[in-house]
Image (cartoon, rainbow, N blue to C red):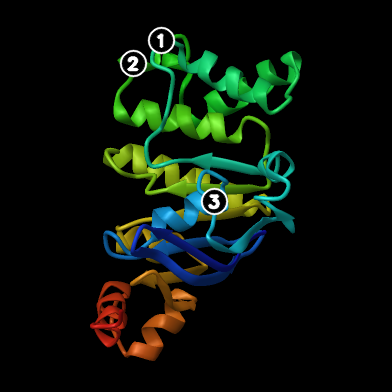
């Protein structure tokens, strides 16, 4: 389970995140929606320990990400907006390096990376350097890296950016499989159809605040909208001018 508790973050005079709270539960996929600059990525970066909150707390399975960072990260797999792969390392070496940092032993690394390569369709490029991989192959490698230590919680920041139709379909199937295994999946996206198809709950963020936190159907019902996209625009419109 991933919890945001009254998270706040400022950059100079700009309040990027203002008192955000929500819970992403085990066995569910939770989506974060928001326009550019709404605070989605800032919120996620605080939850996985890259940014330090100015207020509030992020918890992974009840562990404070700021107070017990290493312990919390052992429960967390992260696919950031930029994949952050080492270009001169092969896909396999990138995955193994991260796994070793997480304390996975050599035998388990070999077995686990093989499992992930088969699941993600990576066998053909596991020995290729990351700098020569396509965007879809880089995303798959970064996802395998995030999952190598078998975490119970997965955070993905706009994971489908730059992916083709088949790669997006494969990613969706992987996220549904992770959900079926009882894991907590939290991801941000601009793609309404993707969120509507995958998510059990949706958190809509605007002006650095949570504007809605409910199931897709509940958000649609409350707004009377025919689609999540229409409901999203209505929620944002209802808060226009908020500062």
Q: Could you say whether the residue bearing mark 1 is in a helix, strand or loop?
A: loop
Image quadrant containing the C terminus? bottom left
Image quadrant containing the N terminus? bottom right
Q: Could you say whether the residue bearing mark 2 is in a helix, strand or loop?
A: helix
Q: Residue at (30%, 75%) from the top-left corner?
A: 232
Quarter occupied by residue 104: top right
Q: CA distance from mark 3 to mark 1?
A: 30 Å
- The vertical placement of 149 against 15, above or below, is above
Name the mark on residue 88.
Answer: 1
Q: Could you say whether the residue bearing mark 3 is in a helix, strand or loop?
A: loop
Residue 58 place in picture, x, y as percent? 62, 58
Name the mark on residue 52.
Answer: 3
185 and 43: which is toward the camera: 43
Q: Is residue 188 visible?
A: no
Q: Nearer the viewer, mark 3 or mark 2?
A: 3
Q: Earlier in the sequence, mark 1 or mark 2?
A: 1
Q: Is residue 237 left or right of residue 220?
A: left
Q: Is residue 226 visible?
A: yes
Q: CA distance from mark 3 to mark 2?
A: 30 Å
Q: Nearer the viewer, mark 3 or mark 1?
A: 3
Quarter occupied by residue 192: bottom left
Q: Earlier in the sequence, mark 3 or mark 2?
A: 3
32 and 40: which is toward the camera: 40
Quarter occupied by residue 101: top right
Q: Residue at (52%, 55%) from the top-left corner?
A: 186
Residue 82 place in picture, x, y as percent? 37, 36
| Residues packed near mark 1 inside 10 Å, few (<14), some (14 to 19) or many (20 plus) | few
181 and 13: which is toward the camera: 13
The residue that mark 2 highlights is 131
- The vertical placement of 111 against 47, above or below, is above
Q: Earlier in the sequence, mark 3 or mark 1?
A: 3
Residue 93 place in picture, x, y as percent? 53, 13
């Amino acid at each position: 389970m991933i919890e945001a508790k009254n998270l706040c973050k400022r950059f100079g005079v700009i309040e990027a995140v203002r008192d955000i709270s929500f819970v992403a539960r085990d066995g569910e996929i939770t989506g974060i929606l928001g326009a550019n600059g709404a605070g989605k990525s800032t919120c996620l970066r605080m939850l996985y320990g890259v940014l330090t909150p100015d207020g509030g707390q992020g918890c992974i399975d009840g562990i404070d990400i700021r107070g017990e960072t290493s312990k919390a990260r052992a429960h967390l797999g992260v696919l950031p907006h930029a994949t952050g792969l080492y270009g001169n390392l092969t896909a396999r070496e990138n995955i193994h390096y991260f796994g070793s940092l997480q304390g996975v032993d050599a035998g388990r690394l070999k077995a686990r990376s093989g499992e992930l390569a088969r699941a993600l369709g990576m066998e053909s490029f596991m020995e290729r350097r990351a700098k020569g991989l396509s965007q879809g192959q880089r995303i798959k490698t970064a996802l395998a890296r995030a999952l190598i230590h078998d975490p119970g919680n997965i955070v993905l920041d706009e994971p489908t950016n730059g992916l083709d139709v088949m790669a997006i379909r494969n990613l969706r199937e992987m996220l549904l499989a992770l959900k079926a295994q009882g894991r907590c999946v939290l991801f941000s996206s601009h793609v309404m159809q993707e969120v509507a198809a995958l998510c059990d709950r949706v958190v809509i963020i605007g002006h650095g605040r949570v504007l809605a936190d409910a199931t897709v159907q509940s958000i649609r019902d409350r707004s009377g909208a025919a689609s999540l996209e229409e409901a999203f625009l209505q929620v944002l419109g209802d808060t226009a001018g908020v500062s």
